[in-house]
């Protein structure tokens, strides 16, 4: 809704706004939808002038169609794929998080959602040297864990600090502060969050459900509306500023006992890619051999299932180790080698 | 309002009729005629957007590749259009249909993509203004025969809340859009496909009973929109067999139930699976 104000466009002066208001035309939508001939008579202004005003307002406030060919060219040059730093997750995501899209991680408590977010933040900031916005809604953000992950990447203190500098953390604990924070970031074009000229490539919200879920249920018009607003601002942010949005969500059980992401069906259309994280139980077939060899890291084994994607077949499943991000480089290569051997064995 | 000769021609000249857009979806020969609206509904991950890509490809592909060679307007309110996915579908259809000798692929692909116009909307008032604005495109491009809206229900909850306690106020925006769309359809005789998300969870335990399905698929958008709709495509996904082989999982089957209300009521059920090259009917 855009209220008509004097000076919005040439020809729309205070007298005309007053006359239009008297004729019950208060917004741009009203003006655009009404019968101009009748309106011109009622307000005793020239039809031509009114038509010109309508045309300018329409051009100002409507979205502009772009040719598919141009859009594709633009996307080819602007889209980046951010590796998560974890080969198994990258495989599920078709090589990483795509900018311009919302990717969702869902899982129960202790399924490793936040740890994956930390790992992604560290990887994007340290390896890809890009800025990251981390919106923490649960108070679960721990800088010391990030530093721990960074220490395995590099022993250079300054590099570690530079990487931490590139991760900008916002703490918000209700939906209004979240919206405030996201709209604020959008309105200044993510400027304040980018340190030292680099651009922001990833926005992480851990978790969306923590602030949205309490609003749902009952006569839930308002809660649903706030949820749509969060979704809307995340989508525009991802597209307009070309950043990858990563959000986390909790899980519920359906009546048949199947795990499914929370926040209901209206939210389910929002993320373009959804991944379900689960803790691996002991004795599950493929995991048992890995768990036996590395007894200590048994608890850090997780499975990730792709449950929605526009690029990959759904329901593909990968197993991975949360400790991955805190391993040194040679451990990673040897781990990768071992994994390859396991894959070729099976 | 004055019109130029070209505009009159664009408006009155017969646009390409899209009754044959996908014969495997609609009952009999009853594809959507000029000015008809098809609603594609269903919950998440039931192939709605994939189905739109299929129709889109069919329209923009050159005649030599089995396409209709008409222009398409895509109104993206969900920000769901995945250009890369679309291009890979077009690409695979082109390579399947054309021999490699027939011109450079890049050029054909570009000409396909230039038949597509994309517009993003982020609120229902913007959607209304944009539809008004698009009248220019409809009047200046006689080749534009299809309007896709993904999705028409995107702003449902925002409008519900913004409208306060008054029910008519809540539905005002979409009603206005529908009325405008109705007029545009009459004047320019384009065909519309619009997706509509489910807002209630389908209880999988009761999936077989007709009661639960009628409850969860009940149209909930405003009346003036329902009046426009002449065909409904209800998408669903066949329950995945847990523990099935990788092959089976890849070939997950989606079902579309089509009901048309033009003249005689007719139904048709078709199913497809999604491959790298897009929708594949079985």
Image (cartoon, grey):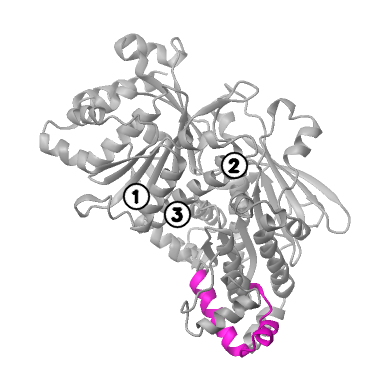
Classify the position of the N terminus of chain B by image quarter: bottom right
Q: Which callout, 2 or 3, points at the residue further toward the start of the chain?
A: 3
Question: Spatial distance from mark 2 to mark 1, Cα to Cα?
Answer: 28 Å
Res B61 seen here: no
**Could you tell me which chain the residue with mark 2 belongs to?**
A
**Could you tell me which chain the residue with mark 3 belongs to?**
A
Res A10 seen here: yes
User: Residue A178 or B257: which is nearer the viewer?
Assistant: A178
Question: Spatial distance from mark 2 to mark 3, Cα to Cα?
Answer: 18 Å
Checking the image for residue A236, the label placed there is: 3
Residue at (59, 84) in percent of width and height = A51
Q: Residues within 10 Å of mark 2 (few under 14, many from 20)?
A: many
Residue B88 located left or right of residue B14: left
Residue A183 located left or right of residue B157: left
Helix, strand or loop for disc 3: helix
Q: Which callout, 2 or 1, points at the residue further toward the start of the chain?
A: 1
Q: Which callout, 3 or 1, points at the residue further toward the start of the chain?
A: 1
Q: Which residues are magenta?
A: A33-61
| Disc 2 and disc 3 in contact, CB within 8 angstroms | no
Q: Is residue B174 above or below residue B184?
A: above
Residue tagged 2: A266
Checking the image for residue A330, the label placed there is: none
The count of marks equals: 3
């Amino acid at each position: 809704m855009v209220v008509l104000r004097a000076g919005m466009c040439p020809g729309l002066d205070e007298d005309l706004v007053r006359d239009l208001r008297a004729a019950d035309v208060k917004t741009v939508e009203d003006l655009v939808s009404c019968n101009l001939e009748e309106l011109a008579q009622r307000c005793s202004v020239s039809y031509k002038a009114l038509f010109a005003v309508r045309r300018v307002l329409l051009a100002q406030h409507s979205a502009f169609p772009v040719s598919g060919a141009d859009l594709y060219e633009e996307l080819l040059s602007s889209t980046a794929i951010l590796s998560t730093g974890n080969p198994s997750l990258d495989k599920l995501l078709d090589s990483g998080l795509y900018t311009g899209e919302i990717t969702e991680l869902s899982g129960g408590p202790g399924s490793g959602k936040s740890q994956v977010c930390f790992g992604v933040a560290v990887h994007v900031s340290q390896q890809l040297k890009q800025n990251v916005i981390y919106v923490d809604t649960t108070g679960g953000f721990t800088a010391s864990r990030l530093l721990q992950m960074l220490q395995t990447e590099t022993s250079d203190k300054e590099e570690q600090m530079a990487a931490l500098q590139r991760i900008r953390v916002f703490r918000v604990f209700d939906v209004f502060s979240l919206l405030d924070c996201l709209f604020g970031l959008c309105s200044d074009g993510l400027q304040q969050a980018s340190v030292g000229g680099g651009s922001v490539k990833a926005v992480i919200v851990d978790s969306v459900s923590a602030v949205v879920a309490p609003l749902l249920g009952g006569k839930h018009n308002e809660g649903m509306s706030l949820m749509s607003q969060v979704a809307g601002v995340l989508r525009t942010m991802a597209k307009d500023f070309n950043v990858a949005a990563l959000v986390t969500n909790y899980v519920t059980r359906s009546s048949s006992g199947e795990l499914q992401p929370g926040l209901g069906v209206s939210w389910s259309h929002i993320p373009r890619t959804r991944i379900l994280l689960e803790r691996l139980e002991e004795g599950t077939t493929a995991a048992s051999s890995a768990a036996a060899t590395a007894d200590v890291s048994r608890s850090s084994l997780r499975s990730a299932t792709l449950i929605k994607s526009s690029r990959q077949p759904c329901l593909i499943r990968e197993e991975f180790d949360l400790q991955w991000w805190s391993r040194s480089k040679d451990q990673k290569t040897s781990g990768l080698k071992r994994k390859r051997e396991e894959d070729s064995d099976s | 309002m004055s019109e130029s000769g070209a505009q009159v021609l664009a408006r009155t000249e017969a646009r390409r009729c899209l009754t044959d857009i996908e014969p495997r979806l609609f009952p009999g020969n009853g594809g959507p005629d000029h000015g008809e609206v098809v609603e594609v509904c269903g919950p998440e991950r039931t192939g709605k957007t994939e189905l739109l890509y299929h129709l889109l490809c069919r329209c923009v592909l050159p005649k030599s590749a089995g396409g209709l060679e008409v222009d398409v307007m895509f109104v993206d309110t969900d920000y769901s259009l995945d250009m890369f996915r679309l291009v890979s579908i077009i690409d695979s259809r082109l390579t399947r249909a054309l021999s490699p000798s027939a011109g450079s692929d890049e050029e054909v692909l570009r000409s396909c993509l230039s038949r597509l116009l994309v517009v993003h909307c982020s609120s229902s008032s913007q959607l209304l203004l944009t539809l008004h604005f698009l009248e220019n495109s409809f009047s200046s491009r006689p080749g534009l025969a299809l309007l896709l809206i993904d999705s028409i229900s995107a702003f449902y909850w925002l409008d519900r809340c913004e409208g306060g306690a008054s029910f008519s106020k809540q539905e005002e925006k979409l009603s206005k859009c529908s009325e405008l769309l109705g007029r545009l359809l009459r004047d320019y005789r384009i065909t519309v496909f619009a997706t509509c998300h489910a807002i209630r969870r389908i209880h999988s335990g009761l999936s077989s009973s007709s009661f639960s399905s009628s409850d969860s698929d009940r149209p909930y958008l405003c009346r003036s929109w329902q009046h426009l709709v002449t065909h409904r495509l209800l998408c669903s996904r066949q329950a995945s067999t847990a523990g099935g082989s990788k092959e089976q999982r890849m070939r997950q089957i989606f079902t579309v139930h089509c009901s048309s209300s033009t003249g005689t009521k007719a139904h048709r059920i078709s199913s497809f699976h999604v491959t790298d090259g897009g929708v594949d009917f079985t």
